[in-house]
Image (spheres, helix red, strand yellow):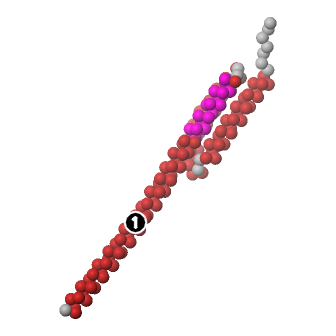
Amino acid sequence: MAKRKRSTASRSGFINQAVKAGRTALKNVQKQVPPDLRRTIEGTGRSFEKTFSAGMKQIQAQLSRMATKADIDRLSKRMDRLEQSGRSTARRATGAASRARTSAKGTVTRTRRTAAKRTASTARRASRTADKAADGGSS
């Protein structure tokens, strides 16, 4: 008995499915990244694009050779890892930005508190001086 060959139509379906999943994962990561951080990342993203496209070409070559359920599962896991790394990068960046904002707010608050204390202590000193002058003048 001769072995049946796989049709090319089912292979291209797998490739299209993999490309669609990759694009969806990329859109999900882009939604979670703040706009200012996105601009920063885009500068370094060029190398990521090259790496990603090289990886996609490698994946497509593997899929064109023989796309099995195991290959699709491996591809899915790989894309999940890429998406998770993008999320963690976004989390780290937004955490750093919020820490910087909190630090700046804390500095302003400390400055206001210090100014208020100085004003209060100056007022107390002036009050004591006035009280002493009033006590010394009436004796």
The residue sitting at the bottom extreme is: 138
What predominant SS class does the magenta segment belong to?
helix
As drawn, 50 above or below 119: above
Q: Residue at x 32, y 74 (%)?
A: 121
For the residue carrying disc 1, how many other residues have a C-alpha within 10 Å: few (<14), some (14-19), or many (20+)? few
Closest to the observer, 118 or 135: 135
Q: Position of residue 106 (x, y in %)?
A: 43, 60
As drawn, 30 above or below 12: below
Closest to the observer, 57 or 130: 130
* Quadrant assignment for the C terminus: bottom left
Total labels drawn: 1
Closest to the observer, 139 or 65: 139
* Quadrant assignment for the N terminus: top right
Q: Residue at x 66, y 42 (%)?
A: 27
Magenta-colored stretch includes residue 97? no
Q: Position of residue 102 (x, y in %)?
A: 47, 57
Q: In the rendered image, which residue does mark 1 sit on?
A: 111
Q: Is residue 109 left or right of residue 57?
A: left
The residue sitting at the left extreme is: 139
> Tag 1, which secondary structure?
helix
- Dividing the picture into quadrants, the one containing residue 130 is bottom left
Q: Position of residue 50 (x, y in %)?
A: 60, 34
- Residue type, label 1: Thr
Say whether residue 16 is visible: yes
- Dividing the picture into quadrants, the one containing residue 42 is top right
The residue segment tinted magenta is 70-86
As drawn, 20 above or below 73: below
Q: Residue at x 72, y 29 (%)?
A: 15
Q: Position of residue 113 (x, y in %)?
A: 39, 68
The residue sitting at the top extreme is: 1
Magenta-colored stretch includes residue 78? yes
Q: Residue at x 47, y 53 (%)?
A: 99
